[in-house]
Structure formats: structure tokens, C-alpha cells
Image (spheres, rainbow, N blue to C red):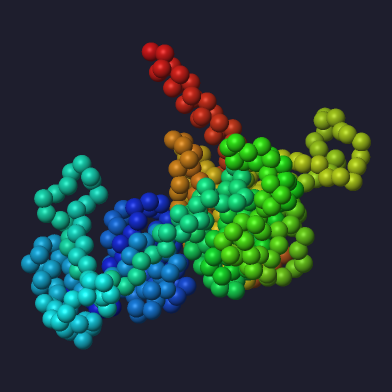
């Protein structure tokens, strides 16, 4: 069975977690390094075995220096549904493309310091309770490189110097940076920076990082600690210390106390990527600054003061402010990567916020509960921002549907309350 098409084909062995995030990550990284997916390569589903056409081994190696969704990559020499098909496939693989002479190999085998490592991988499907007697597919190839799965453990939040209630999981942080095509010497911004977990992932890939947050105590590392058995944060618990912990302090630009709804920026394009996890009212409140004049009528006012008060910030307003900010400040081709919370029974793709300057690249779901989830949205700036673009979302069909998600917090906790009541009823029966 001859291998059809180009011979520079590779077998990618994927990790079996965050399944929806895998394809956008690999696509983004291939695009970053000069490769691309073909249409026939979009049907992998849940399988851990992906066959890719990649222009060169250098691109394959660069891909594996970044991905946290893939375990290993192999130069694919042959594959088949049986040993006989595999053998036939190997005999048709061009000899000039082999690192050694044609099988069976001749010469001394060095297991301690081999020049090349060859692997046979067998695919027995995805059901551990129904394993077939024979594999569905057998692959043979030359090992090229492993992915960056070890980053998930080495950057684990459990080991981090400064954390909060919403510190992003290390694996997802790196996935977000990869979806954003973050690279060396980029400037990456997080307008809802929290404890800086997303800055760390971008800095690891050589980007200079900057952020803002409305919470003074979080930005300055003050107040109550988030760790168990620790009452107050220590004197050096802050975002800079997190970057210092991983030897990344040189990539730290600054973090400011600032309101994301009122960005104090001059007109211009500053950022290569904006990567963020906005608050959506579950563990952290959605807030913006305002004046007493903005408080609705009928509510008793305090004496006028120059000190801003904290006002509620609707989710729909927050996300459209974020899209406008990205459209204004991203360079052309720069990416916005953010989390969008949704109430699953009401969700449709039309609810994803839209902007004329931004193109939707990917939309991946992570379940939060039976009825709620959050979606990782990746968008790319495709045209320059004009003043008229600022309110274009009001004309979009997406605006009104997403306004319904302003009550996401209430719907989330309504589901939690019902689940607790159901569990208590079951325990009493």
C-alpha cells in the first residue's frame, strides 16, 4: 500500500486532554512557522494519531518546541491496517528519504546514544472497555522530537509563588499563548491580569509582557492570601516575583492599576497579542470605575467625591469594550485570545461577540458544569481601526443574543443550587 501524496509526512501523537483545543493550537503553530493544514486533515476528532504534511523537518521541530497538546512527532515511513499493509507501505517509501538503508537495518545498534530512534505505534481505538484483538492501524516512523508537556508540571500553579482564586491552569495558559501565535520579542498585554498567569506563559516564549487590573490589592500583592493555611500575602508575593521564579523577569514590562472599560491609551497599535481571562462574576466580580453621577436614580448617594466608586459591569459591555480595545491597539495580524462564559442551553455561535476589524479564528469549549461552559475565542486583526468601527457591534445580529448572558452569574449559581438540593434529597432517601 503506497503512501499517497507528498512524502514529507509526519505522525503527530496527541495528548488526550483538552481535545477541542488541539487542532487550533497545531494550526496556529504551523502558521507561525510557515506550514499549514490541508482540508483533509480536519477530521481527526478524538484520535491521538494525526498524519500531517509539513514542508520540512525544521518546521516539525519548531512545532514541538511550542506545543503542549502533542506528545511526540515522527517522520512517517509507513502505515497500514495490518502488518502486511505496513510492510507494503514501507517498501514503497523512497529510499533516498530514509535516514538509513532500507529495512532491515544493518550495522551496530547503539541503545545508549542512538543516532536515530524508530517506533512502531499501534492504534486500538478510544474505548478502554472494548479493546480489539488487532489494532485498527499500525504506524512506523523515525522519532523527531517531543512536545512541551513537561511545562504543565514545571509551571504548575501549585508551585507558584503568587496565586489567586482564578489563577489560570498552566496547560491552558500555554495553549492560549500558542493560539495567540506569541513569539520572541512580541509585546503581549493582559487587561485583566490578576496574578499574571497568562503573562508567564507568553514570557516563557520570549515575549515582553504587560498588564492592568482594577484590583489594587491583587496588582500590588496585598491583602488576604489565596493559599490554604496562609492568612496574608507575603512581602514579595506579586506578579514580578512570579516571573522571577521562572527566570523570566527580564520580559516583565509593568502592571498597572487601571479600569479596562476606560483604557488610558493614546491612539496607536502597541500589542502583538492580547491574551486574557476576563472576570465573569463567579469567583471574581465584574467591576468598573465610575462617578456618583452614574449611579441610577432612586439610590441614595454619598457626598460627592473625586474618589471613583465601583459600579457593575455587564458582560456584554465588557466583551465589546475588549473587542474595541483589541481592534484599536493590536498590530495587523495580531491576535486576541479570551474566555467567553456561556449558559449552555441557550448558546449559539451567533452569540460570540463580533467586530469588523477582527476575524474569528477558533472557538473551543471547556465545560464548567452541566449547564455552563466557557469558550476560548481566538480572533485576528484583519483591518485598521476607524472611529465608525467603535459602535458597529450595535448593528450586529450578535449583540442582542449575547446581552442575555449578562445574567450568566445568576444562571450559574441557580444550577449549583439545584444540584446541591438534588444531592441532599438523594442522600436523605
Task: Identify which residue, 348 or 180, lies in the foreground.
Answer: 180
- Left or right of residue 75, residue 322 in this image: right
Total tally of numbered discs in the picture: 0
> Extreme bottom residue here?
96
- Residue 326 percent location from the top left of the image: 64, 62
The quadrant in which residue 272 appears is bottom right
Q: Nearer the viewer, residue 146 or 393?
A: 146
As displayed, is residue 96 above or below residue 30? below
Q: In this view, does 153 lie above or below 303?
A: below
Can residue 82 be seen in the rendering of this structure? yes
Q: Which residue lies furthest to the top in this view?
A: 429
Nearest the eye: 195 or 259: 195
Left/right placement of residue 288 relative to residue 407 reads: right
Is 187 left or right of 352, judged from the image as shown? right
Residue 52: horizontal and vertical position, in percent?
31, 69
At 34% from the left edge and 52% from the top edge, which residue is drawn?
16
Q: Is residue 54 above or below residue 137?
A: below
Q: Kindly give the residue lying farthest to the left in the view shown.
A: 84
Residue at 11% from the left image edge and 50% from the top image edge? 133
- Residue 428 vs residue 99: left or right? right
Q: Percent position (x, y) of residue 427?
A: 41, 17
Residue 66: where, in percent of width, then height?
45, 67
Quadrant housing the N terminus? bottom left
Q: Is residue 382 visible?
A: no
Residue at x-position 65% and y-position 41%: 225
Which residue is painted at 86% across and 45% down in the image?
307
Quarter-of-image position of residue 286: top right
Amino acid at each position: 500500500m503506497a503512501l499517497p501524496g507528498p512524502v514529507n509526512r509526519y505522525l503527530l501523537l496527541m495528548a488526550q486532554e483538552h481535545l477541542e483545543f488541539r487542532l487550533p493550537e497545531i494550526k496556529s503553530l504551523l502558521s507561525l512557522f510557515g506550514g499549514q493544514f490541508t482540508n483533509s486533515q480536519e477530521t481527526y476528532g478524538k484520535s491521538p494519531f494525526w498524519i500531517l504534511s509539513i514542508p520540512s523537518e525544521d518546521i516539525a521541530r519548531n512545532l514541538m518546541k511550542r506545543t503542549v497538546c502533542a506528545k511526540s512527532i515522527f517522520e512517517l515511513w509507513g502505515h497500514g491496517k495490518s502488518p502486511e499493509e505496513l510492510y507494503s507501505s514501507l517498501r514503497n517509501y523512497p529510499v533516498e528519504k530514509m535516514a538509513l538503508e532500507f529495512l532491515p537495518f544493518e550495522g551496530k545498534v547503539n541503545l545508549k546514544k542512538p543516532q536515530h530512534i524508530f517506533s512502531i505505534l499501534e492504534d486500538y481505538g478510544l474505548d478502554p472497555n472494548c479493546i480489539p484483538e488487532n489494532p485498527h492501524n499500525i504506524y512506523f516512523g523515525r522519532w523527531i522530537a517531543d512536545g512541551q508537556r513537561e511545562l504543565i508540571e514545571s509551571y504548575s500553579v501549585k508551585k507558584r509563588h503568587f496565586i489567586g482564586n482564578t489563577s489560570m491552569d498552566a496547560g491552558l495558559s500555554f495553549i492560549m499563548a500558542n493560539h495567540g501565535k506569541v513569539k520572541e520579542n512580541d509585546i503581549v498585554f493582559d487587561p485583566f491580569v490578576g496574578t499574571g498567569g497568562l503573562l508567564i506563559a507568553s514570557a516563557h516564549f520570549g515575549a515582553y509582557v504587560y498588564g492592568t487590573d482594577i484590583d489594587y490589592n491583587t496588582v500590588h500583592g496585598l491583602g488576604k492570601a489565596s493559599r490554604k493555611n496562609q492568612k496574608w500575602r507575603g512581602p514579595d508575593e506579586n506578579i514580578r516575583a512570579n516571573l522571577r521564579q521562572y527566570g523570566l523577569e527580564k520580559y516583565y514590562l509593568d502592571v498597572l492599576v487601571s479600569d479596562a472599560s476606560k483604557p488610558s491609551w493614546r491612539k496607536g497599535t502597541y500589542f502583538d497579542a492580547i491574551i486574557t481571562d476576563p472576570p465573569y462574576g463567579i469567583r471574581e466580580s465584574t467591576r468598573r470605575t465610575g462617578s456618583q453621577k452614574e449611579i441610577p436614580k432612586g439610590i441614595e448617594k454619598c457626598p460627592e467625591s473625586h474618589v471613583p466608586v465601583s459600579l457593575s459591569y455587564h458582560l456584554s459591555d465588557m466583551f465589546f469594550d475588549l473587542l474595541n480595545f483589541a481592534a484599536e491597539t493590536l498590530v495587523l495580524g495580531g491576535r486576541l485570545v479570551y474566555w467567553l462564559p456561556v449558559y449552555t442551553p441557550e448558546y449559539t455561535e451567533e452569540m460570540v461577540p463580533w467586530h469588523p476589524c477582527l476575524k474569528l479564528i477558533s472557538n473551543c469549549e471547556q465545560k464548567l458544569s452541566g449547564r455552563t461552559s466557557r469558550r476560548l475565542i481566538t480572533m485576528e486583526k484583519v483591518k485598521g481601526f476607524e472611529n465608525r468601527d467603535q459602535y458597529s457591534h450595535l448593528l450586529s445580529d450578535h449583540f442582542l443574543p449575547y446581552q442575555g448572558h449578562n445574567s450568566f452569574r445568576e444562571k450559574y449559581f441557580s444550577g449549583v443550587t439545584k444540584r446541591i438540593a438534588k444531592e441532599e434529597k438523594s442522600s436523605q432517601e
